[in-house]
Amino acid sequence: MDVRNAHQNIHVDFVKKRHHSLLHNISETISSPSTPPNNSFTTNESASVHTTSVETQLGASAQGGQVILATALILVRDACGEFEICRVLLDSCSQVNLMTQALCSGLNLRKSRNNIDVCGIGSSPLKIAFKMQTTIRSRINNFETSLEFLISPQISGYHPSETVASADLMIPRNINLADPEFHRSRGVDMLLGAEASFSLLSVGNIRLGDNLPTLQKTLFGWIVSGKCSAPRQPISNPSHCAAISTIDNINRNVEKLWQLEEVNSKRQHLTSEEYQCETHFLKTVTKSNGRLMVKLLFKGDVRSLGNSRDIAMRRFLAMENKLEKNPTLKSEYTEFLKEYEELGHMS
């Protein structure tokens, strides 16, 4: 056997099996006619390769058309009990329901405190500070349900990214669409996760054809989802997914980190009052029960405060007269001052 051919065969067999990607030349691996290995494990190097391939496929998909996500127009109850119409995105892969801050403010809904991190693509956490409960209703039947929503500044961008020619999709005329204007590029107000998405499904499914979306019957009406045929002129559109955009949040956090970690190398010139404040702080600051305490610093001479005793006495007597006329208020006021003194906040 030729030594050169034997070396090539050994190299191809080696590529097909488990190995470290840094042990061979990448260009040789790509040019080899061998198929990618079907391993049951994933290393960091292989993960990076898969990520690159996914990005390439998304770019090709954007040039060959776009994927329509399922949207619907529904009714949402506001603070006055009235129902307002909004646009929702059905995402069966989400564990939570989301609502934009703009919609929550417009409905004047009452929010409650919440502390949860929502992770999307790349596992970048987005802190959600508020949540709320409200009722949603279908536009075409009597279906309604109460759901909990997390309040997010933004859910996704405009969807679809480009307006689609709905006439080319050949949708049957007797279909009652959940979102009659699904083909128009518009924003999304809410996201319904798996909790509600699967419970909305009904019996009924229509495939419009190759490279065309699919119609699915739901309690909100027929939703449209799937790939659309390629536009006449190739365009490059961003690919969307039902995940929270955290780029702005990450940028703000990084900016805050820079501000906290920034070291000012220039020595600032302190005025006499600033120097006095800093010296007073260093001399009187103490730590007790996890709290930092510092004595108050009077500005200038204490005698410059003037004669304020008469004013204070008049206010004190006026407060006593007010409390004597209202025994309930006097009792609450006394209990508050007693608690304030017991806590050590005054003496």
Image (cartoon, rainbow, N blue to C red):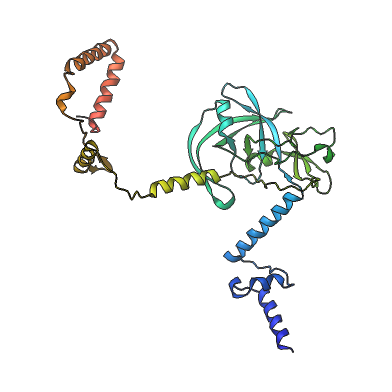
Please tell me which residue is depicted at 26% across the width and 29% down the height of the picture.
Answer: 340
Q: Is residue 113 left or right of residue 102?
A: left
State the quadrant of the C terminus: top left
Coordinates of residue 59 in the picture (x, y in percent): 70, 53
Q: Is residue 309 left or right of residue 177?
A: left
Q: Note whether 262 is above or below 97 in the view shown.
A: below
Coordinates of residue 70 in the picture (x, y in percent): 71, 40
Q: Quadrant of residue 99?
A: top right
Relative depth, front residue between 241 and 149: 241
State the quadrant of the N terminus: bottom right
**Residue with the most extreme left position:** 303
Coordinates of residue 118 in the picture (x, y in percent): 54, 45
Please tell me which residue is depicted at 58% across the width and 35% down the height of the picture.
Answer: 100
Relative depth, front residue between 290 and 145: 290
Q: Quadrant of residue 49?
A: bottom right
Q: Can the viewer see residue 22 in this picture?
A: yes
Please tell me which residue is depicted at 51% across the width and 46% down the height of the picture.
Answer: 251
Coordinates of residue 48 in the picture (x, y in percent): 60, 62
Q: Note whether 27 is above or below 73 in the view shown.
A: below
Q: Can the viewer see residue 43 in this picture?
A: no
**Residue with the most extreme bottom position:** 1
- Total numbered badges shown on the rendered structure: 0
Q: Note whether 203 is above or below 307 in the view shown.
A: below
